[in-house]
Amino acid sequence: MKKASLLVLFSVVFTSYTFAQTERVIGPAEKKMTDTVCNCLTRLDMKKITNKAEANAAMTNCITLHLDMFKNVIDERNVDINDRQAMTKVGIDIGANMMKNGCEGFIKVSSILAQDEVDNKGETGTTSGVLKRIDNKGFNYFAITDINKSEKSFIWLREFPGSEKFTNGLGDYAGRKVKIKWDEIEVYLPAAKGYYKVKEIVELTLE
């Protein structure tokens, strides 16, 4: 298991605010992970956490300290670490557990992240072009050439309609014309060790 991969996964999942879930049985490993991360967050001095960067750092630190527990959760739920959707679901469920349990620390940190996301909401738009390749730079980026022969890059952070077509690369879709709907967001890029604005794919349509 790659430590960096888990940190990236959690950073994305815990800031997505997609906490809806149905009633289900929570195993002992998942409960221990939920309670431990909650306790870590609740012990933080919230007066020192006032923006997105500080909230993300706090969340990441509490997770980093307990990656061994997350491995136990993966084993308990029989999840393949290479299955991005299943891994994302585990992270969402742990966040949902803390929200459902009224975890004070998680709710406070999440509210800071949510408010910062509203205050710094970027542009949205649609770009058409030809699929060239998928670059892996810590995250996957779709590279396309637009009508002006200019190369544009769009980050693939979360599942979008049709994303399952590209889990093994472009394949036969290389060279196809596409229309990408995107949102501009600010994310922490591990490779660059900083926060940057990127265009996240929310919909990709083959033309």
Image (cartoon, grey):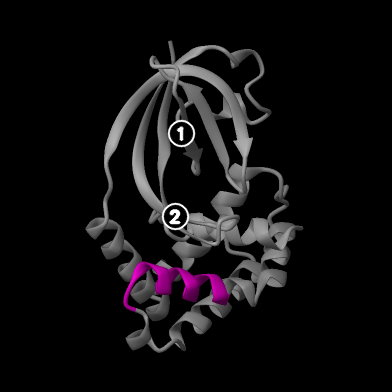
The residue at the point 49 percent across, 23 percent down is 144
**Quadrant in the picture for residue 183:** top left
Distance from disc 1 to disc 2, alpha carbons, whole Å, reads 18 Å
Instruction: Residue 199: say if magenta.
Output: no
10 Å crowding of disc 1: few (<14), some (14-19), many (20+):
few
Q: Residue furthest front?
A: 149
Q: Is residue 46 left or right of residue 169?
A: left
Mark found first going from the N terminus, 1 or 2: 1
Residue 60 locus on image (x, y percent): 54, 70
Amino acid on which the number 1 mark rests in the picture? Phe
Determine which residue is flagged by label 1. Answer: 160
Measuring from the top left, give residue 97's x and y in whole percent: 48, 66
Q: Secondary structure at mark 1?
A: loop
Q: Nearer the viewer, residue 139 or 60?
A: 139
Looking at this view, name the residue that lies furthest to the left.
119
- Which secondary structure is most common in the magenta stretch? helix
Residue assigned mark 2: 187
Residue 102's image quarter? Answer: bottom left
Q: Amino acid at mark 2?
A: Val
- Range drawn in magenta: 50-62
Where is residue 11? Give x, y as percent: 51, 60
